[in-house]
């Protein structure tokens, strides 16, 4: 399990950190993005609607059934910070690997 904590669907499976690989923390994620320049009231309304949806017990149950923990950003700025960190992290990995686009 490469997530930072054990998942509810597989509580007996240890994380990579627990197995002795502290740098091996990774998980898939999805986000909702809007075009640059979208008015802040629209961004805030969309963010509030997404938070309400993802906080729904039915949605949480559906995701948990697939082994997915629902995690939301506290704000659009938190999401932007997360995306920037992920871009930096994985950009470095790609560059160091020497991978090329053919």
Image (cartoon, grey):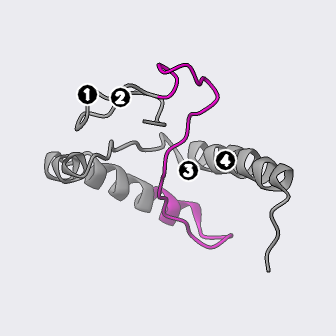
Callout 2: SS: loop
Spatial distance from mark 3 to mark 2, Cα to Cα? 26 Å
Tell me residue 11's x, y (percent): 26, 28
Residue position marked by numbered label 2 in the rendering: 6
The residue lying furthest to the front in this view is 19
Q: Mark 4 against mark 3, which lies toward the viewer? A: 4
Residue position marked by numbered label 4 in the rendering: 86
Q: Going from the N terminus, do you reach mark 4 or mark 3 first?
A: 3
Q: Going from the N terminus, do you reach mark 3 or mark 2 first?
A: 2
The residue lying furthest to the bottom in this view is 102
Residue position marked by numbered label 3 in the rendering: 76
Question: What are the residue bounds of the magenta stretch?
Answer: 16-44
Spatial distance from mark 2 to mark 4, Cα to Cα? 21 Å
Callout 1: SS: loop
Spatial distance from mark 4 to mark 3, Cα to Cα? 15 Å
Q: Going from the N terminus, do you reach mark 2 or mark 4 first?
A: 2
Kindly indicate the quadrant of the structure image that contains residue 82. Answer: top right
Residue position marked by numbered label 1 in the rendering: 11
Q: Residues within 10 Å of mark 4 (few under 14, many from 20)?
A: few
* Residue 62 located left or right of residue 44: left
Residue at 33 percent across and 42 percent down: it is 69
* Residue 17 located left or right of residue 62: right
- Disc 2 + disc 4, Cβ < 8 Å: no
Spatial distance from mark 2 to mark 1, Cα to Cα? 6 Å
Residue 37 or 33: which is nearer the viewer?
A: 33
């Amino acid at each position: 399990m490469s997530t930072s904590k054990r998942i509810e669907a597989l509580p007996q499976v240890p994380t990579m950190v627990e197995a002795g690989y502290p740098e091996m923390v990774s998980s898939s994620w999805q986000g909702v993005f809007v075009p640059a320049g979208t008015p802040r009231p629209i961004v805030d309304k969309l963010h509030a609607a997404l938070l309400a949806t993802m906080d729904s017990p039915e949605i949480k149950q559906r995701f948990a059934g697939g082994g997915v923990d629902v995690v939301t950003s506290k704000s659009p700025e938190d999401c932007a910070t997360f995306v920037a960190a992920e871009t930096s992290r994985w950009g470095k990995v790609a560059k160091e690997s020497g991978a090329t686009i053919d």
